């Protein structure tokens, strides 16, 4: 212990005598360690920590697998399918379902739209195994069609609205103008894996008799049998799917079941991006370690005479090795301490950039014992990594040569430093290429043709309560009056409405048939996604009609049933454009009693389910012929659309004072939300690549500059013998570019291998894109030229007389 303390004191004094070296080394490590700690804190909170439920490994999500019908592998459940799977003996310990619920709260101040969910009984206590703080969850009698209206409150809602009063149990609140009795209060911090910010929960009241196997309207969470594997659960679930397909060939033919671990399903959209970021930031740390190793090698070369004299005087090589490792660990420890501060700031920045409410555990990310332990390990590890080669080399100092030279670099040391620079240039290029691909991908996503124009459009969403608006005529009247009021807002040029905004993710589909078309197999029906729109919707959204006309006010309940189809549907099912789609008729429902709708227009495709997703067959119905209670109004005007927000709220209150909008936001926000994950990954990877480029440039500059210092006698002789300054500059720059060229070759080979992991993250850009590779090589070469030119310029200005006199 006494020897260790002496080593630490001596190392501290040695480092303090070289403040510039120490500051550069510590800050280089601090940024590398800090960035790694920040990213690891997010990866740990989101991907590595267990979900906050009892036996979380037993929790799974169950979906219908529609891939054999050209559909997704994660399709929502129908009520009838849910009943079948839930009733299967031995399949799951418990299976629950949930759906969206966004009621308007009245009677407690200004009408407010709440965030909520409808869940089946047992979801809290038996599926998630979370006991309410007060009261209870839902009973079987409450979770049946037309059962009692009861509600469970979140802890925050209970505190905000009832001041934490225990007597709130048994009281009623008005949700969408219907009284609900409070039966339970959930514990503080409870966040279900679905709708984690929910304020209220009500019974789902699944009713398979309403639309059986035709309504894909609910999602499921299940708890596997103890000890059952995912593969076994999938096999059992697919056995249920096979029986259902045989009994219901039209609705469920070729439909399977998908079972995924709950955590994997929750993080699937961000998991690969987070692992890529962790890999990238590890590269940054390795480059930082390489830089510090080069600094130590250069410093060790200058201390070779010191080590040689100590060995000549009888010192063992072991204590010298230990001393140098102590210096490395001291540098790494200082870098780790400062890195913790950088990590704390970086973690806050990461959370600010991260897509909201998409990653479980993100809200709990922060500095704790696990993160401190990780930082300590990474600091010790980096100290050993970057200190290894310098310490080994210094401990092997040649006594005779070291004493004779009185210091200076050996060719072996120079080759090692060169090799380290080549390595860090290669790693930097790999990061730069990856970042370039993601940035180009994000640019393509950002400029992708959406099929509509978001500029200057405000979206106002609201839902009518079923009690006073249970009839179609009442809904039509409300929205007609609301549209009239919104059109009177100064600056608004056009107003439309739809039940399904693009990129919002809420849509429904249905089977249909085309008049005169050949009958299709029962397992391969024609399917279209259904949207209901008002007459001015297409004009307000700037959606192009390729043929025919849009809807008019005369397309009401008494008029001929009409429909507008999108281009994908017309091409797939109507032989468009070889044959006109306008004038053809389609039927939904019973083929023996068809209710025909005439196609009056063909609309250009829109990106409705995501910017990356391809378009799907879709139809637009005139709202007056198929009214619904939930609509989103879109207002187009000049300038910032948020200036219309207050006037829009006033227009809603003027038609019905008891209603409130569930959301009011520019349509651009939907696009921003769709791009949030891509923006997050591309921004961070671009930042890490820039840091790697900076470190590589500094490392190259350091090696070239040190080489110039060691060769000043040679430069003086060259100048004395008549060489020009340009000759000396070319000599130095050529050496720097040769190292860069070797690093570029290494980096290109590595990038070609590594970028294959980015294939699912990039959009409309090949992972071997020559433009990206070429641009990144050019940028890196430019930095290398600058890093080499500065010491080359110093070398060319050397005074031959002074240099030779010093020798």
Image (cartoon, rainbow, N blue to C red):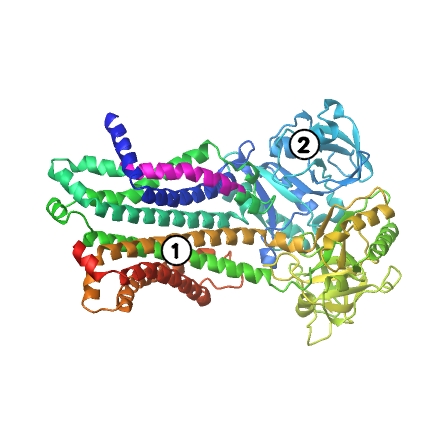
Query: At numbered mark 2, what does the secondary structure look like: helix, strand or loop?
Result: helix
Q: Split into 4 quadrants, where in the image is the C terminus? A: bottom left
Q: Which residue is mark 1?
A: 428
Q: Residues within 10 Å of mark 1 (few under 14, many from 20)?
A: many
- Who comes first in sequence, dot 1 or dot 2? 2
Q: Is residue 606 magenta?
A: no
The percent coordinates of residue 774 (x first, y second) are 42, 66
Disc 1 vs disc 2: which is toward the camera?
Answer: 1
Residue sitting at x 43%, y 42%: 34
| Residue 552 visible in the picture | yes
Query: At numbered mark 1, what does the secondary structure look like: helix, strand or loop?
Result: helix
* Side (left or right) of 262 relative to 167: left
The percent coordinates of residue 411 (x first, y second) are 19, 54
Q: Split into 4 quadrants, where in the image is the N terminus? A: top left
Using the image, tell me which numbered label, if any, was put on residue 239.
none
The percent coordinates of residue 349 (x first, y second) are 53, 44
Magenta span of residues: 326-348
Magenta span dominant secondary structure: helix
Which of these two is toward me, 169 or 54?
Answer: 169
Q: Which residue is mark 2?
A: 156
């Amino acid at each position: 212990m006494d020897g260790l303390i002496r080593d630490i004191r001596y190392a501290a004094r040695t480092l303090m005598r070289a403040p510039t070296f120490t500051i550069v080394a510590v800050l280089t490590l601090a940024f590398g360690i800090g960035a790694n700690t920040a990213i690891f804190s997010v990866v740990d909170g989101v991907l590595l920590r267990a979900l906050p439920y009892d036996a979380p490994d037993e929790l799974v999500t169950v979906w219908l697998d529609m891939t054999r019908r050209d559909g997704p592998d994660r399709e929502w459940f129908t009520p009838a399918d849910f009943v079948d799977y839930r009733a299967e003996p031995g399949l799951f310990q418990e299976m629950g379902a949930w759906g969206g619920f966004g009621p308007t709260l009245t009677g407690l101040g200004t009408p407010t739209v709440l965030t909520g969910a409808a869940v089946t009984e047992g979801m809290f206590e038996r599926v998630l195994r979370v006991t309410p703080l007060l009261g209870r969850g839902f009973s079987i009698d409450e979770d049946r069609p037309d059962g009692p209206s009861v509600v469970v409150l979140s802890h925050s809602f209970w505190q905000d609205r009832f001041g934490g009063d225990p007597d709130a149990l048994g009281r009623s609140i008005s949700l969408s103008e219907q009284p609900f009795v409070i039966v339970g209060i959930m514990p503080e911090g409870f966040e279900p894996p679905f709708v984690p910010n929910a304020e209220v929960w009500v019974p789902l009241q699944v009713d398979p008799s309403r639309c059986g196997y035709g309504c894909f309207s609910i999602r499921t969470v299940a708890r596997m049998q103890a000890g059952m594997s995912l593969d076994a659960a999938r096999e059992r679930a697919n056995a249920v799917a096979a029986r259902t397909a045989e009994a219901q060939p039209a609705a469920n033919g070729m439909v399977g079941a998908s079972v995924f671990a709950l955590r994997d399903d929750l993080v699937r959209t961000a998991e690969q991006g987070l692992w890529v970021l962790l890999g990238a930031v590890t590269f940054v740390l390795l480059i930082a370690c390489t830089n510090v190793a080069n600094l130590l090698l250069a410093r060790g070369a200058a201390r070779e005479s010191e080590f040689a004299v100590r060995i000549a005087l009888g010192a063992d090589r072991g204590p010298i090795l230990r001393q140098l490792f102590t210096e490395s660990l001291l540098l790494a420890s200082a870098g780790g301490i400062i890195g913790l501060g950088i990590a704390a700031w970086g973690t806050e920045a990461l959370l600010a950039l991260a897509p909201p409410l998409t990653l479980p555990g993100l809200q709990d990310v922060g500095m704790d014992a696990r993160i401190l332990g990780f930082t300590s390990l990474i600091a010790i590890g980096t100290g050993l990594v970057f200190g290894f080669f310098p310490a080994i080399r210094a401990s092997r100092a040649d006594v005779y040569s070291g004493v004779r030279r009185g210091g200076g670099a050996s060719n072996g040391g120079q080759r090692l430093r060169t090799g380290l620079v080549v390595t860090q240039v290669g790693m930097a290029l790999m990061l730069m290429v990856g970042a370039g691909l993601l940035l180009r991908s994000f640019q393509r996503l950002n400029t992708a043709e959406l099929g509509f124009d978001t500029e200057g459009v405000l979206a106002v969403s609201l839902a009518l309560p079923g009690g006073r608006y249970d009839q179609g005529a009442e809904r039509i009247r409300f929205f007609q009056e609301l549209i009239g009021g919104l059109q009177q807002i100064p600056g608004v040029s056009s107003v439309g409405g739809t039940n399904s905004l693009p990129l919002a993710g809420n849509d429904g589909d249905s089977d249909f048939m085309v008049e005169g078309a050949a009958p299709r197999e029962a397992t391969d029906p024609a399917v279209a996604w259904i949207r209901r729109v008002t007459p001015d919707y297409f004009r307000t959204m700037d959606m192009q009609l390729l043929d025919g006309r849009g809807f008019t006010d005369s397309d009401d309940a008494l008029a001929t049933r009409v429909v507008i189809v999108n281009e994908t549907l017309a091409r797939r099912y109507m032989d468009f454009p070889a044959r006109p789609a306008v004038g053809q008729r389609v039927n939904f429902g019973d083929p023996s009693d068809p209710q025909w709708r005439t196609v009056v227009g063909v609309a250009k495709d829109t990106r409705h389910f995501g910017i990356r997703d391809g378009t799907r067959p879709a139809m637009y119905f005139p709202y007056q012929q198929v009214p619904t209670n939930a609509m989103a109004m879109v207002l187009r005007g000049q300038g910032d659309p948020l200036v219309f927000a207050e006037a829009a709220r006033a227009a809603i209150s003027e038609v019905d004072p008891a209603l409130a909008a569930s959301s009011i936001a520019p349509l651009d926000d939907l696009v921003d939300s769709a791009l949030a994950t891509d923006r997050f990954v591309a921004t961070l990877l671009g930042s890490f690549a820039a840091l790697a480029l900076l470190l590589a440039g500094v490392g190259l500059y350091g090696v070239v500059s040190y080489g110039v210092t060691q060769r000043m006698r040679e430069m003086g002789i060259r100048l004395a013998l008549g060489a020009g300054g340009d000759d000396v500059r070319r000599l130095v720059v050529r050496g720097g570019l040769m190292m860069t060229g070797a690093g570029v070759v290494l980096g290109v080979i590595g990038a070609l291998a590594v970028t294959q992991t980015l294939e699912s993250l990039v959009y409309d850009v090949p992972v071997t894109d020559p433009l990206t590779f070429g641009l990144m090589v050019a940028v890196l070469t430019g930095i290398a030229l600058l890093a080499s030119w500065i010491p080359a310029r110093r070398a060319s200005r050397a005074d031959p007389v002074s240099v030779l006199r010093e020798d």
